[in-house]
Amino acid sequence: MKIWQLKSLFDNYQSFQLLNLKEDRKKYFDGKIDLAIKLSDSWGKIFIECVEGDKKSDCPMFWGELGTPMISRKAKEILEPLICNNVEFLPLIHDVTSEVYYLINVLNTVDAINYNKAVLEKLSTGLIIGFEKYAFLANKVEGQIIFKTFLNQRLHSSTVLVSDEFRNTVLENNLKGFEFVEVWDSKDRA
C-alpha cells in the first residue's frame, strides 16, 4: 500500500484563478476552505479565469488555495463514486467557456502520522512547517481513499493525500494533468 500526495501538473496545462479575486476570496475562501468543513450550503456562483497554459487538464492548477484540488467535469464523474463520502464538489465556472470545474473540498481527516518515524520539516527557528518524510500508522490509513492529516494536532491543510486506488482510477481512465508524488510505502514501514 502506498500513499500519494495529489498535485496538478504544469506542463503547459491551463491554470485558473478567481475572476473576482478579492470579493470571492474574502466571501468564500478566507478562513473557510482547507479546513475540512462542509461549505456547499453557503457556496455561490463563482467564476474563474484561465491565467496561463494552453492544454486542457482534468486537474488544472487552481491558484486560490494550495490544498484544494480542482478537477474537470469528466474527472468528477469518474472519481465521484470512489470519493463522494469523503469530499464535497464545489462548482466553479469558466468565465469564457462557461465550462464547470469543481474544487475537491476534502472532508476526511485522519490522525495517522507515526511521529516516531516521520521526519518533520523545520525552519531555523525550530518552527515545524511540514514533513520532509511521511510515516503513517498503517492501520489508520488502510482503506482511506482521499484524506488530509494532522501535523502536531493541527490540520495539515495544504496537502491532499490519496491511495493507490485513487491513483489507479485516474491512470486507468487516462485523466490528464494529475501528478502523484509517492510519500509513503507500507513495505518500507518508515
Image: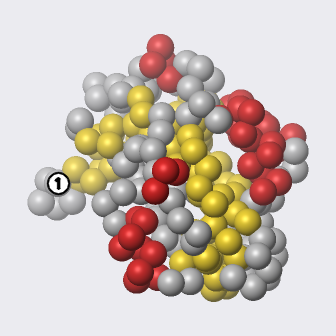
Residue 87 in the image: state x and y as whole percent. 56, 40
Residue 165 in the image: state x and y as whole percent. 71, 30
Q: Which residue is mark 1?
A: 127
Residue 182 in the image: state x and y as whole percent. 59, 42
Q: Residue at x 45, y 19 (%)?
A: 140
Q: Quadrant of residue 150?
A: top left
Residue at the extreme left = 125
Residue 114 in the image: state x and y as whole percent. 34, 25
Image check: 120 left or right of 54? left
In the rendered view, tell whether residue 143 sits above or below residue 99.
above
108, 113: nearer the viewer? 108
Q: Is residue 179 visible?
A: yes
Image check: 145 left or right of 64? right
146, 95: nearer the viewer? 95
Q: Quadrant of residue 74?
A: bottom right
36, 135: nearer the viewer? 36
Image check: 166 left or right of 97? left
| Quarter containing the N terminus | top right
Name the kind of residue labelled 1 in the image.
Answer: Leu
Q: Residue at x 87, y 40 (%)?
A: 172
Q: Is residue 187 visible?
A: no
In the rendered view, tell whether residue 22 sits above or below residue 140.
below
Q: How many residues crowd mark 1 within 10 Å: few (<14), some (14–19), many (20+)?
A: few
| Quarter containing the C terminus | top left
What's the coloring here?
secondary structure
Image check: 51 left or right of 79? left
Instruction: State the count of labels.
Output: 1
Q: Residue at x 63, y 60 (%)?
A: 91
In the rendered view, tell whether residue 1 sits above or below residue 128.
above
Label 1 element class: loop
